[in-house]
Amino acid sequence: MAAQELVVQAPVAGRIVPLDQVADPMFSLGMIGDGIAIEPASGEVCAPCDGVVVSVHSRGHAIKLRADNGAEVLVHVGLEAVALRGEGFEVAVAEGQRVAAGELLSRFDPERLAALCGLITTPTVITSDAFHIERRAEAGPVAVGDAVMTVAPVGAPVEPPKMTSDREVVLEMTLGFHARPAALLAEIAKGFASSVQVSLGDKQANAKSPVSLLTLGCRYGSRLRVSAGGVDAEAAVAAVAEAIASGLGDPVVPLGTAPDAASAEPGEAPAPSEPFAPGERAVLDGIVASPGIAMGTVVRFGASRRAPAETGADPATETVLLRAAVAEVARHLKTQAETSRNAPQREIAAAHAALLDDPELMDAADKWIAAGKSAGNAWCRAIEVQTTILRGLDNARLAERAEDLVDLEQRVLAALAGESLDPVALPPDAIVVAEDILPSQFMGFGEQLPAGFVLAKGGRTSHVAILAASSGVPMLVAVGPDALRIPEGAALVLDAETGRAVVNPSAQAMQAIRAASAAREARRDANRAAARAECAMADGTRLPVYANVGSVGDAARGDAFGAEGSGLVRTEFLFLDRRTAPTEAEQLAEYQAMADAMRGKPLTFRMLDIGGDKPIPYLPGKPEENPILGVRGIRMSKRHPDMLRQQFRALLRLAPGGQCRIMLPMIADVAELRWAREVFAAEKAALGIAAPVPLGIMIEVPSAVALADRLAAEADFFSIGTNDLTQYVLAMDRGNPDLAAEVDAFHPAVLRMIAQTVEGAKTHGRPVGVCGGLASEVLAAPILIGLGVASLSATRSGIPDLKAFIRTLDLPTCRAVAQDALQQDTPEAVRALVLARWPDALPPSLAGIIGESAGA
Ligand code: PEP
Ligand code: MG
């Protein structure tokens, strides 16, 4: 063996797998280093060589050694999830300690860790660029101490080879350059002996390194120069340039045909549209996600990202500043994690604290500081490399972590700038204008919600829309890029009834809107005062109106708005935005608190409905090309029956027993229902519960409508989820902003599906309710009732108006109008039909005044 060579030994016993087959792109694409991976058969991690421990991750899953020849070897137990959830590592060494090959580094319980985090594959990689792997062991069984790699220095630094060939190529990939094409390009470049470079302006990247390529920051329209030096330079340049031109598997639009981006200068973001001038009046259209009217002052959310100075003082000073800022943010997060009033906020703060603790972020920032950058600039660069990679991986879970990293970037920059880390208190009339917001960001407003929201993106039935509607805060979504032209501090009227926002309305118009709003408020107050009474139609037909509920607070507020119980408890909100699943005891406590808040009134708990647009981070799942048609709802439960069992148990243990019904989401056929019913019956029997507990199903998949009579034989009740039913009947993604206006549950095709469902239910005398968004629409009430729907579950803020209107209806008229509705051709015609019969169904519109304000 040559003097500088290092033999790396297996750190754990198990089975070697090639690194490129590991289920984490960070490792499989070689972004962290080259090496091997082992599927561990035991939980003892030993030193893979003699050396010094240079870092031990605070969770203990990642330990890096520096061997005597200078090569750094990282042993990383488990994949991405372990960084967040891996607990229970017993670390036997400390940073700075010298160890001998084979000496114990740490211990873990493989079964427990696998249950907690999914895969526990253990990559062992060489992280120093100055070394390469000369030989490595084949896939197969391995014992601790077996030689698995021979590592040698790449050689003394040499002059970069002279570039002998080059070519310019324009990047025409519409998605810009992200991790997957970067990895593909690096693979192509590695097929040549020559060194190959890609440059953008004065930035250069090694074409054989995906990370190096990503740090160029090139995007659509960037003019790149590909150059190479070596024996096959010409062929290398041709192959790499052609690969870039071909799009590397991503969509390509020739420059000049995509006007916005084509005008972008190389390496620059396309110029944002000009903000509206001070006082400039503008009317923007959007989709109503949560109805209501608001007037107020614009607060831009997430619009201004701090951009620190590029260079700073000397590296020692900048290092101290960065460490102090990170420590301050860490302290703040810890306090939030311990003291925030609601559970999601506590969980998010804890997750952010774990991310902030990642030594790789600090390592990267240190390198930039050593290169002369300021603390803030170095921190941004360290974060940006990670976010670029994460966002490019087409994996929703990892992309969410990118948003979390941006959040941390900004917090650390705020701390560096000496700013307070507490959330900025919103003025009472704030109308938040943003590109989009996440449910976690919405929850971050806590009790101090803004007066309204105007979002450039988003969908009518997104979870943020559901949160807004359940809080009674008006929200307009899918307004488009003009929303981002609304300046901070502008006056704004938000008409989330007709779907318009007026920027800088005239003073007279504001006054008129105030007066009209007061009249509407008076009507609303009267309806609210009467809301607590039971709801019956004018002819005496009882028609209970329930509230949709996602939390204990929702249940309590629903009760205050006159809800006669809950027809839909979305239990998934308890499972989202956490690092681990809630235990049975936690679930029971939360469900019991909801039931108590409803003061004895009935509740229908829906079993966990996740997957699709509601991923949860701790359930391992393969990335799906089309998650809306993927493993969601009951399909997810079939893959995790223990979670279903546990949730059944928690619900069955509620007291008093008769208060709750249970329903299953996304049932597509009888076999799924039978399977879940058997699990339910087994848990019920195990708990010794003899009293009947109704088990019903959501009708939200067209096949369930087609099979309604068969399903009715075995389900105790139906509840129609018109949000999903509409998306699947019309084949339109409910979250797609471009389709937001068309995904309309008033569509006669959807109404016919509801009619068919009721007919199917009748064959076994099963009651049918509606709990999707259509149940909250005042104009839909007579149609649904006329079709035979027996109860409605709505967003709580609309319940008083809904009840007041239902009290004016009679069954024969509703039946006649419903039959007419089934014969219409468009949703607009259906609405017009109802308005023609009940012209006062909606409160007086502000549209006229708002229209004048736009023109005034
Ligand atoms: C529905 O699909 O209508 C429904 C009520 O379920 P969710 O909106 O939670 O998917
Ligand atoms: Mg649904």
Image (cartoon, helix red, strand yellow):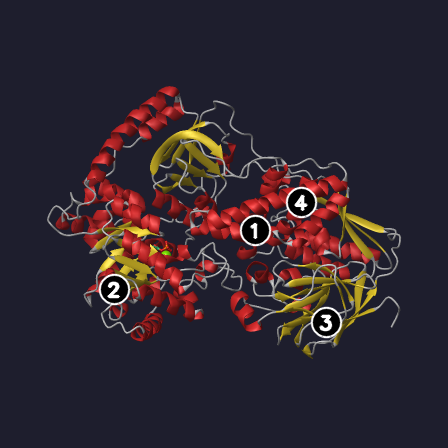
Q: Which residue is mark 2?
A: 657
Residue at the farthest top position: 508
Task: Give me the C-alpha separation between circle 4 and circle 3.
Answer: 32 Å
Q: Amino acid at mark 1?
A: Ala
Measuring from the top left, give residue 754's x and y in whole percent: 27, 57
Label 3 element class: loop
Q: Which residue is mark 3?
A: 103
Task: Give me the C-alpha separation between circle 3 and circle 1.
Answer: 31 Å
Residue 499 vertical placement versus 595 (above, below): above
Q: Which residue is mark 1?
A: 353
| Residue drawn at (57%, 68%) of the image | 119
Horizontally, residue 749 falls left or right of residue 121, namely left
The C terminus: image quadrant: top left
User: Could one spot residue 743 in this view of the protein?
Assistant: yes
Horizontally, residue 674 falls left or right of residue 50, namely left
Horizontally, residue 797 falls left or right of residue 370, namely left
The crowding category of the residue bearing disc 4, from other C-alpha atoms within 10 Å (few below 14, some 14 to 19, many at least 20), is: some
Q: Amino acid at mark 3?
A: Glu
